[in-house]
Image: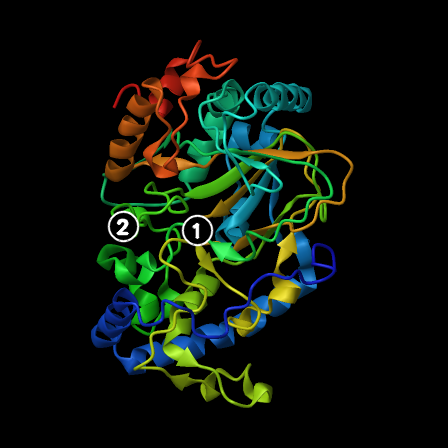
Amino acid sequence: MPGQIHKWPAWPEYNTNNSTSQDQDFVDTKKAIIEEFGQENLQKAWIRVCEDLSSITDEIVEQGNKIIPICSAEQILENGFSSNDEERIKKTGCVIIRGVLPRTEAQELYTELHQYISDNQGTINAWPVETPSMYEIYDSPVQNTIRSHPRHLKLQKLLNGLWHDKSGETSSDPLIYYDGVRDRPPKQIFLGLGPHIDAGSLSRWAAPTYRKVYESIFSGHPEDHDAWNLEVRKDAVQDLFKAPSHSSVFRAFQGWTALTPSKAREGSILLYPNVATTVGYMLLRPFFNPPENDADIMDARKWSFDESGCHFPGTEKDQSQFLSRSSHPHLRFEECMMHVPEIQPGDTVWWHSDLCHAVDPEHEGTQNSSVAFIAAVPTTPMTKVYIKKQLADVLAGSQPSDTQGKVNETLLKGYRGHENFSDDARRAFGYYL
């Protein structure tokens, strides 16, 4: 089936208790949720999401990566998303927008980025240490050229507009959140980012407002969960446990802009094309223990309610939320985790902040695979506070506080600052906050 992993990588499994299982934060969090919502509602929700996953996963297997929506930037930027586009994006939680930047322009930007990294080798940091590919630069000329591009800014606004909020406190006007870049050479194996969900780990359960985002799931009505409601989420604390892997800013869509071609087994990205039901399953999983007989694993009714234990599979306070085949079996990862279709320079890939995704562990291509990580961030009260501070930090030579980096980027060779920004770009970067 197109898009499926040809051989499951050696990603960690999370079917046994982790070292944090007696951490008081885990204990208190589980107790609080059971007291608030009750065993009956949690069990009702568990049965419902597992039953729904049966048909959802069958559909994903049948369609392969064709289930991932693909749109043309020319059409979207001219006319917005069609009702069919919007329906598919909201169901899968992801979309590919082709041709956001002209291909030749993206290729030229990659040449410039590669040279910038080379010129500042030894000053900028990258990981993994043994095979550097994820570069901790945030205010480079190439990144800012892409972020401030009028086509990119317009697309971010359209993506933000897929969320809704009746409070009147938010806007789809984009703000720019600083993230890094990747420039991955061929033949590098990378197992550091298997199936995972960003935007906090234990925070989803432990932070009261964040937990309220998923109230319908915990209260026994997962079918009522609206994954696109910003009204409560705009105030949710995602980084209750501060760590470089946690963003303090709500990203309506995480995303990357391709600077080089990529495809399956060539440094691409894998997505799990369903958002609402899968996050519900992940949130309910810590409250249930699997049956002893492996033959009964897929029968949700044979899982037992776990009131006293406090194991949260794949959850570490300082990491993203990880998932695996053995800890989350109803997701049928080997069949449903999909490589995105082939990507060309200037194309963009976007995924909902609750969507499970992974970095391609293989790169069997012949050239570097490079992307700039640029998210779609709506204007919210909490986001404005961070973006204003972010701008002050970078103008003073400090890397953004979320990154915990220590490099003064204004001293890097080739640094240009924020020259020639349009008024729209200056607004997105926080100059008018």
Amino acid, disc 2: Ala
Residue highlighted by disc 1: 198
Of the pair 300 and 30, the residue shown nearer to us: 30
Image quarter of residue 379: top left
Of the pair 237 and 182, the residue shown nearer to us: 182
Q: Residue furthest right?
A: 366
Residue highlighted by disc 2: 236
Q: Quadrant of the C terminus?
A: top left
Q: Secondary structure at mark 2?
A: loop
**Disc 1 or 2, which lies upstream in sequence?**
1
Image quarter of residue 18: bottom left
Image quarter of residue 19: bottom left
The x, y position of residue 314, in whole percent, is 45, 64
Q: Residues within 10 Å of mark 1 (few under 14, many from 20)?
A: many
Query: Looking at the picture, does residue 86 appear above or below residue 42?
Result: above
Could you tell me how far apart the alpha carbons at marks 1 and 2 are, in whole angstroms? 14 Å
The x, y position of residue 327, in whole percent, is 51, 72
